[in-house]
Amino acid sequence: MIRGMRLDNRYPAVDVLGVRVDDVTEPEALERLAQFVVAGAPHHVVTPNPEIVMAARRDPAYRAVLNAADLAIPDGIGLLLAARLAGARLRAHVRGTDLVLRLAARSAREGWCWFLLGAAPGVAAEAGRRLAARFPGLQIAGTHAGSPDPSADAQTCGMIASAAPVHVLLVAYGAPKQERWIARNLHSTGVPIQMGVGGVFNFLAGSSPRAPAWVRRLELEWAYRLATEPWRWRRQLALPAFISLAVLEGARRRRGG
């Protein structure tokens, strides 16, 4: 492998209502992230879920950003259902939060440095402190709440450059702002792994509760989040719309239309 070379995606992908989703398991995704670090070039990692897919259907520019990513993990059980209805297969639901934790453990062993960007002021710093305590040896090179506004890009990229070397950049501005931020600044930061993580910092910092393991096993995280954060109800309206479209698309493909 040539240092500084971008890696092509080697995994089969499924088209879920216009958004490319890679058929990877969690161990495969983690290994791919490790390969990105070894390669050295910047790579964009996205975590499509039904809400993101529905947003991408309304916004072709955002859909193009997602489909240009170097790795797109299936972060939602609805994606697996939609793929099955379309006659395709995604082997695993790869949760973004779990992948971040596995990557933290790997980074602590390998000496990879992290930068945490986004969330409310103080949240990234607290998430970094808790990660470093949970995974001894994990190096948090910097944290910054920052802003997804393009006018702040130069300052933020400068902070990341000052913290170098940075191997992992997690961006928590929420979709679609975080993916757009990474797409704009991918080469300016030059970080090998750049991944939008939504509300993961809130979970890690303890400011938002994560669904218990038994709820996650039943694939009912969406219901738990709605119960604990009822203000999310408008966003959750994307779920029935997603399932309806997935059923219609599956029927169309079975008819050969």
Image (cartoon, grey):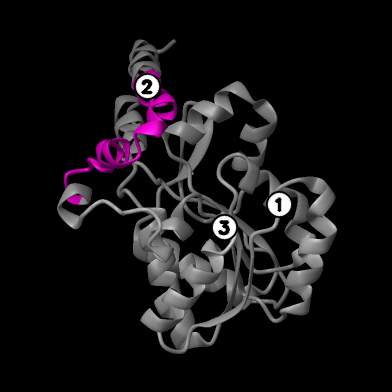
User: Badge 2, how many Cα within 10 Å: few under 14, some, many 20+?
Assistant: many
Residue 45 lies, with reference to residue 129, above or below; the image says above
Q: Secondary structure at mark 3?
A: strand
Residue beneath the point at 37% across and 53% down: 208
Q: Position of residue 171 (x, y in %)?
A: 60, 57
Inspect the image, locate mark 1, and give the three-letter code of the amino acid beneath it: Ser
Residue 68 visible in this rendered orientation of the protein: no
Q: Which mark is residue 195?
A: 3
Q: Say which label, 3 or 2, has the lower sequence index.
A: 3
Instruction: Measure how far apart labels 2 and 1 are at the Cα level.
Output: 34 Å
Give the mark toward the camera: 2 or 1. 1
- Residue placed most toward the observer, 225 or 251: 225
For label 2, the SS is: helix
Residue at the location (35% across, 39% down)?
Answer: 229
Mark 1 — residue? 147
Asked if marks 3 and 2 touch (Cβ < 8 Å), the reply is: no
Residue nearest the observer in this picture, 234 or 137: 234
Of label 2 and label 1, which has the lower sequence position? 1
Query: Mark 1 or 3 closer to N-term?
Result: 1
> Quadrant of residue 125 in the image?
bottom right
Left or right: where 89 falls relative to 141: left
The residue that label 2 is drawn on is: 246
Disc 3 marks which amino acid? Met
Start-end of magenta stretch: 217-242
Front position among marks 3 and 2 = 3
Q: CA distance from mark 1 to mark 3?
A: 16 Å
| Mark 1 secondary-structure assignment | loop
Along the horizontal axis of the image, is 103 left or right of 38?
Answer: left
